[in-house]
Image: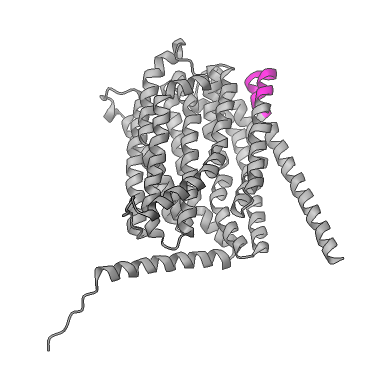
Amino acid sequence: MTRKKYLIPDGAVSSNVTCQKQRLRAVRKRWILTGSTSAVLGQLTTPMLFAILALFGADLIELYFASRLGVEELTAMSFTLPIQATVFAFAIGLGIVVATRLTQARKVEELAAVSLIFTAVVGVLLAASFWFNLLPILNVLGFDETSAQQLKVWPTLMTYMQYRLSAVVLFFTIMVVFGLLRAFGNMRAAAWLLVTFSVAQVSISALLFSPVAHSMQLSGLEKLGIAHFFAACIGCAYALFLLVVKENISIKVNLLSQKSRHTFRCLIRLSVPVVAMQLLTPIAQSLLMGVVATQGSDAVAAYGVVMRLEPIALLLPMVLTTSLPIFVGQNWEAKKALRVRRGVKLAVVACVAWQLVIATLLFLGADMLSVGFCKQSEVKDAINFAVTVLPISYVALAAVMLYVSCCNAIGRSGVALNFSIVRLFVLSVPSAYIGAAVAGFHGIVWGLTLSNFILGVCLVLYNAKKNETLSVQKKAVLS
């Protein structure tokens, strides 16, 4: 007898794989709704802890390499941080928009390619805007290319930024795929994506600064720009691999179809409010940089180090702002308010404990940390003072960050927006401006510290008043 062989059509195999991926996503969602609160938050947060640490750690190491080049290079790179923060804000905003749009759609595969093309278009427009207006923007931030110190580093700083701006589309793709993977519940793959990008950036930077590459006729800042560009290439390739191969999402599309045009319009409509809210922080950072620049180049160099240290000090709250909204949003939609409150309380307690430990460690190690970044006495003393005073106020800032992220997750974006505006433009920037007028750079640090504590008090009073109002309403209903 001859054995008959039955061939399964390729389309059937592809459909089966797609169904398996969809079932896996459904299982992840049920687990978020039914698993132990601490276990769910732990498994959502732990991979992101390493991912965010790798991402901001790579930025901090890049700044450390710049500090080894000299105070002028450290100061020059510090002036570019608001621009880099703006790029990052756009990337985060696009990631939120695309992830929200795709996870709400029934046929995810049909929308993924359009979303990636939309991301690329936004990236090109943003990069071109910065590319052709780089010097005027830096001038607004306080950079003066006519001074002797900054004139010396301007050519290499421009080349550094051109490399970074060339990588904007690649970086946007990484962050959008990162958001998609998180929305699908695949936190481990999302974490590995950021870790891969960050490790590549640090490794290439270390290689270019090693004796092996000593013969290359490149300045230090140019080497850092090249390292970021090639790391973005590696990260982008890995992101597309995860999306197409691991999640089995096709990126084929007909841009002229009616569905593609509708998706483009929808993404534009969703992007405007989300990206606008994300841009509040870099706008405030730009204003703060302008205030700091009035205190001289040493203050700018010190403030640049503090800006890169802050995300590391706020690591756990920042990670929870990426994982807690997933838990809160899905449980709130499932009418599990008690489970939401339990998760938020657990996150707040963990953040308070974390920030107290971090503040203690930074207070004890401030001198060693400041010497590690700069041995020039004025810059070293400024870093030392900021690292000693500012971190204790991060306890209040962490609570506000969690509250804002939870408000966004349950659809109370207006409350979140109001708190963000108050934090940045009513408290932080005016406090820094007044502090600079009274006591220079030390006054700026004290002003930012005081504004964080005032914001924490405002949050406590707001919640107390809201709870009192709810209690009165319940009594009225019962009576």
Q: In the rendered picture of this protein, how many numbered marks are placed on residues? A: 0
- Viewer-proximal residue among 336 and 370: 336
Measured as percent of width and height from the top left, residue 261 is found at 40, 50
Q: Residue at x 60, y 38 (%)?
A: 361
In the displayed image of the protein, which residue is found farthest to the left?
A: 1
Rendering quarter of residue 338: bottom right
Measured as percent of width and height from the top left, residue 95 is found at 46, 47
User: Where the N terminus falls, by quadrant?
Assistant: bottom left
**Most prominent secondary structure in the magenta stretch?**
helix
Q: Is residue 73 visible?
A: yes
- Viewer-proximal residue among 37 and 20: 20
Rendering quarter of residue 65: top left
- Viewer-proximal residue among 72 and 364: 72
Task: Reply yes or no: does residue 437 show up in magenta.
Answer: yes
Please say if 190 is above or below 423: below
In the displayed image of the protein, which residue is found farthest to the bottom?
A: 1
- Viewer-proximal residue among 366 and 246: 246
Rendering quarter of residue 285: top right
Please say if 168 is above or below 405: above
Q: Which residues are magenta?
A: 433-447
In the displayed image of the protein, which residue is found farthest to the right?
A: 479
Q: Is residue 381 visible?
A: no
Task: Reply yes or no: does residue 70 show up in magenta.
Answer: no
Measured as percent of width and height from the top left, residue 82 is found at 51, 30
Measured as percent of width and height from the top left, residue 238 is found at 34, 49
Q: Residue at x 57, y 68 (%)?
A: 34
